[in-house]
Image (spheres, rainbow, N blue to C red):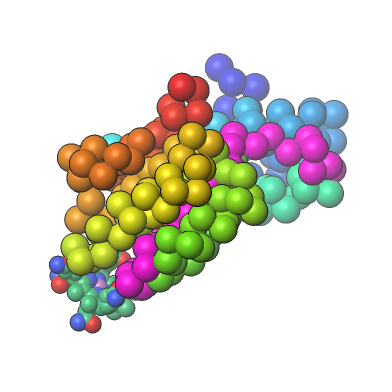
Amino acid sequence: MSEYSNLIQAILEGNDVKCVELTNEALDEGANPGDIVSSGLQAGMLIVGDKFSAGDFFIPDMLLAARAVARAMEAIHPRLSESEMPTLGRVVIGTVSGDIHDIGKNFVVMFLRGAGFEVFDLGINVPADRFVAAVKEHAPDIVGMSALVTTTMPVMQHVIAALGSAALLSQVKVIVGGAPVTQRFADQIGADGYAADGGAAIRLCQKLLEE
Ligand code: B1M
């Protein structure tokens, strides 16, 4: 059983008060802040992601869990230097040009941040050249694109082409998602992966970083 099983349980229950209490207790007992984040908070959020993907958790469960993790992070932050912050990887993400839907993309951002990724959210209606500029600026491991409308899906391919023209494709993995997007479409446009939801996005990013 994990040293942080009570903390993980509090995250699964979405109990932010308990989560902060257990985090402060662990800090007072001398636990390493980085350990609390990776073995407690991030581990808990990964389980939340899996439960959401499996249909056992719903959007309110996920929001409560994310809030509990965010509150615990506030308690930890003053005790953790930037260099100690465990980061699983860097992700640049946005909803592609012509598309203003961001509710699902924002969930994915929340999931990835909760699981420990450093996420640069470019927002909505993001053209190819802004993805390219963001990759140059932030040097991410992964570029994520969201599209909710069938007519904006082709923009994903334009972004991949633009990253290729800028000779950046060898430095990043590209993932795509959104209601009309499928694994087949991802394969067709040469993306490295497709995720159906926030939980799947966490697993996909982890898998791509291990390759
Ligand atoms: Co729009 N809309 N909308 N809309 N809208 C849809 C997408 C539509 C299917 C509705 C319909 O007609 N039945 C339809 C598209 C049809 C098509 O493609 N053929 C549509 C349309 C047509 C439009 C407009 C053109 C309507 C108009 O003005 N005539 C218009 C403008 C579109 C544009 O972008 N230019 C428009 C506008 C809007 C609102 C502004 C009103 C609003 C958006 C508000 C916002 O996002 N801030 C809106 C909404 C809310 C919807 C519906 C109702 C809901 C979308 C949503 O938020 N779902 C939608 C119909 C529907 O889906 N039932 C619809 C909840 C969200 C949690 O799920 O976004 O799928 P989702 O995200 C999931 C996964 O897809 C995945 O994870 C998320 C969490 O599980 N995921 C990723 C998403 N991105 C990912 C990225 C990843 C990985 C996973 O990796 C990078």
In the image, residue 61 sits, relative to residue 175, either above or below, namely: below
In the image, residue 41 sits, relative to residue 75, either above or below, namely: above
- The quarter of the image that holds ligand 1 is bottom left
Q: Which residue is drawn at 49% across and 34% down?
A: 170
Question: Going by the image, does 208 lie left or right of 87?
Answer: left
Instruction: Say how many tags the image has.
Output: 0
Question: What x and y, as percent, mark residue 106?
Answer: 45, 60
Question: Going by the image, does 2 lie left or right of 208?
Answer: right
**Residue 108 magenta:** no
Question: Going by the image, does 165 lie left or right of 29?
Answer: left
Question: What x and y, as percent, mark residue 207?
Answer: 43, 27
- Start and end of the magenta stretch? 79-107
Question: What x and y, as percent, mark residue 28?
Answer: 84, 36
Residue 73 in sight: yes
Q: Which residue is drawn at 57% across and 44% down?
A: 140
Residue 199 in sight: no
103 or 17: nearer the eye?
103
33 or 19: nearer the eye?
33
Which quarter of the figure has residue 107? bottom left
Question: What x and y, as percent, mark residue 180?
Answer: 20, 56
**Residue 92 magenta:** yes
